[in-house]
Image (cartoon, helix red, strand yellow):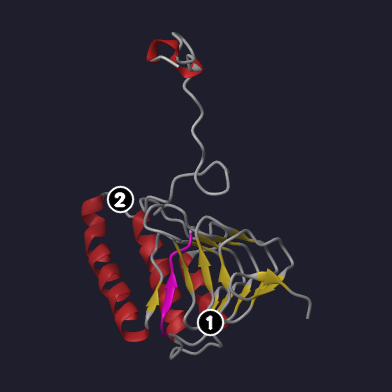
Amino acid sequence: MAKDDAPVQTSQLPGAAPAAQPTPGHGRPRSPLPRGDTDENPKDISVLRLILEDYRTHDSDLTQPGFWAVAVHRFGNWRMGIKPKALRTPCTVAYRTLYTAVSWAWGIDLSYTVKLGRRVRIWHHGGIVLGARAIGDDVQIRQNTTFGVLAVSDLEGKPIIESRVDVGAGACVLGEVTVGHDTVIGANTVVVKDVPPNSTVFGVPARPVKL
């Protein structure tokens, strides 16, 4: 077919709407990642009561690295409510110092830009990278867990972990996936697709099992 005889694309017609572009990640609409410019702590409780609740969640033990990782996360969000920015600067310096100390000392990477629910428990420590879009209430996380992107070609494709998910040691949840509430993710499992609520999954890649 000659070049001039090629079929006209609808998007090329004057006044036509642009062709729809595929949405990355399972074809779902994607909201932007949190910018980190607001306080995203749970709104139904004060920050002091929230940290006290986190302390009780970690067996009221100040030696638990998971408690300090969560407490620093709460502080990082709380400081965003301080206006103007000049007054917030000392808190920002303190947050970055504490965040780096937790990461280097205990191997727990939990940025304040991750939307974190209540009573999240981080068991043990080491090799924990929690780069999720959001983590719900009452989630249990163990050592060597990774939540994050699947590939550098999609740096905004991050997982959502719903409430009461129990994550085994060494598990990876990667890409723009949702792990439904009340799910168990077995040790060393790799999740790259959505997991329905009330599931138990094991394996590489994750597969549903009945125990």
Whether the residues at callouts 2 and 1 have beta carbons within 8 Å, the answer is: no
160 horizontally vs 155: left or right: right
Can you tell which of label 2 and label 1 is closer to the viewer?
1
Residue extent of the magenta highlight: 126-132
On residue 28, the disc is: none
Residue 145 x, y percent position in the rendering: 49, 77
Q: Considering only order in the chain, which callout, 1 or 2, is on the residue closer to the N terminus? A: 2
Q: Secondary structure at mark 2?
A: loop
Q: Hey, what amino acid is under mark 1?
A: Arg
User: Hey, which quadrant is residue 105 in on the image?
Assistant: bottom left
The answer to whether residue 22 is magenta is no
In the picture, which quadrant includes the N terminus?
A: top left
191 horizontally vs 148: left or right: right
Q: How far apart are the two marked residues, 2 and 1, measured between alpha carbons?
A: 36 Å
59 horizontally vs 150: left or right: right
**Label 1: few (<14), some (14–19) or many (≥20) C-alpha neighbours in 10 Å:** many
Residue 101 x, y percent position in the rendering: 29, 79
Q: Which residue is mark 1?
A: 142
Q: Which residue is mark 2?
A: 83
Q: Residue at x 45, y 64 (%)?
A: 148
Residue 119 x, y percent position in the rendering: 58, 73
